[in-house]
Image (cartoon, rainbow, N blue to C red):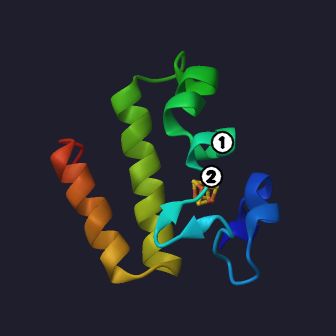
Amino acid sequence: MLKLIPALSDYDDGNGVCRYLKNNLCDIYKDRPLICNVEAMYTAFFKDAMDEDTFIRENLNACLKLSKQFGDKKNQHRLKQLMLRKDLI
Ligand code: SF4
């Protein structure tokens, strides 16, 4: 799946999973690329186009669609719970 994202294609471990994903956590979280940092991406590129809640909702919806297509049901459940907690659905 990562190969579908040009900015992250070098991060693909060969199975479509990021090589920095360890035990379901980002191993380079503090130094993750800009595209992986939702808040930084919003500030850098989207703050003039939409409010932050809309941006976060759109990101979570995209994650949910990708998870339905490529991921597992546990991730889908976690994403839905996160969206409910943040009152985004
Ligand atoms: S957040 Fe970390 S684990 Fe996830 S894709 Fe980005 S670099 Fe990889």
Q: Along the horizontal axis of the image, is 86 left or right of 54? A: left
Quarter of the image with the N terminus is bottom right
Q: Along the horizontal axis of the image, is 60 left or right of 37? A: left
Q: Along the horizontal axis of the image, is 2 left or right of 48? A: right
- Disc 2 on helix, strand or loop? loop
Q: Which residue is mark 2?
A: 28
Given the image, on which type of amino acid does mark 2 rest? Answer: Ile
Mark 2 touches mark 1? (CB < 8 Å): yes
In the rendered image, residue 32, in percent from the top left (x then y), is placed at 64, 46
- In this rendering, the answer to whether 77 lies above or below 42 is below
Disc 2 beta carbon < 8 A from ligand 1? yes
* Residue placed most toward the observer, 24 or 58: 24
- In this rendering, the answer to whether 84 lies above or below 44 is below
Q: Along the horizontal axis of the image, is 23 left or right of 40? A: left
In the rendered image, residue 88, in percent from the top left (x then y), is placed at 24, 43
- In this rendering, the answer to whether 47 lies above or below 12 is above
Where, by quadrant of the figure, is residue 68 drawn?
A: bottom left
Residue at left offset 46%, top offset 24%: 50
Q: Which residue is mark 1?
A: 31
- Disc 1 on helix, strand or loop? helix
